[in-house]
Amino acid sequence: MIMNFKHTQSAHCESGVTVNLLAHQGLSLSEPMVFGIGSGIFFIHLPFVKLNGISATSYRIWPGGIFNRTMKLLGAEVVTKKFSSPHKSMEALDKLLEKNIPVGIMCSVYYLPYLPDAYRFHFNAHNIVIFGKEGDEYLVGDPVLHEVKRLHKDDLLKARYAKGFPQPSGKLYYIKSLPNKEVDLKNAIRRGLKRTSFLINRTPVGFIGVKAIGYLAKRLQNYPKTLGDRKSLLALGNLIRMQEEIGTGGGGFRFMYAAFLKESSKLIQNNELAKLSTEMTEIGDMWRDFAYNSAKIIKSRSSESNTFVEIGDKLALIGEREVDFFKRLGQVKII
């Protein structure tokens, strides 16, 4: 069971899977466009949710959000399922492959042996495409890799039912059909911008949305006191790992959103979006500088309070820029 599926490498797993599944249906969209209309950019810091013992931070919308929102705005009919039974989940996957339907899978990167050891850690929200099977091996289009890979059924099963947060629970998803009429991309852009502005600006709690960056900055400055020397460095390291290694991270997501704004400005002839694209690129540079300076602190193993105060000030400045940016983004008029 091997279908004619074209795998293309991308910057981020979920937006990349979405692009490849759409292309298989005959609709070609760029990854930044999918990320933008899918309202992929976000920020959240959850002090009560632990990943490897450290508070979780995410620079993108929750898993599944990009795919679901993009498909809704494009008018696509999709199917998303989870399974309590591992056997039924694999059986359902095989039946879809027999029908020549490429399938998106949410899984853990830890159980994907084709990845280098450095990339295999307990992260359960990775997305891949399964588009064929030969014997006990599945053909995998992993968006972070250029080449198609093979994965034994036992490894795939482990990856689909990894323990931890979030639990993949055998999740699979696929496109059933696209609308016969031409996609109204301008309307999708307008609605995507509106929803992004609403989600990131108007959350009722301080640890979700753009204001959470300032919230994290204050917590970061107190890490040496609240966590101690060793754990404060671990927490900072985990923050940077979430930013730079999982998906495209803080800076990379900002650069991708800047590319979306630039592409949209040309499609709908809106100069305000072009200017905002330049600003978002600058913010992405600030995130990368923050990661670089944080890495220097971790390498030197310096957990002095003044060092964390300085790096917290840099993060607070990024937060101020993003609060101002997304406020003005929400005021852009698209006719």
Image (cartoon, rainbow, N blue to C red):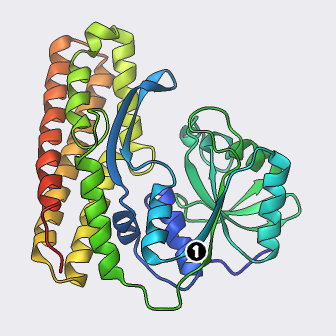
- In this rendering, the answer to whether 236 lies above or below 266 is above
The furthest residue to the bottom? 181
Compared across the picture, whether 219 is left or right of 139 comes to left
Where is mark 1, residue-wise?
A: 77
The N terminus lies in which quarter of the figure? bottom right
Residue at x 22% of width, y 33% of height: 293
Q: Could one spot residue 9 in this view of the protein? A: no
Position of 226 relative to 20 (above/below): above
User: Which residue is found at the position 18% from the left and 50% from the top?
Assistant: 283
Disc 1 residue type?
A: Glu
Left or right relative to 23: residue 149? right
Q: Quadrant of the C terminus?
A: bottom left
Horizontal and vertical percent position of residue 65: 46, 56
Locate residue 58, reporting x and y percent: 39, 41
Left or right of 207 in this view: 53:
right
Q: Residues within 10 Å of mark 1 (few under 14, many from 20)?
A: few
Check the image and name the residue furthest to the right.
135
User: For the point 18% across and 45% down, which residue is it?
Assistant: 286
Quadrant in the picture for residue 300 = top left
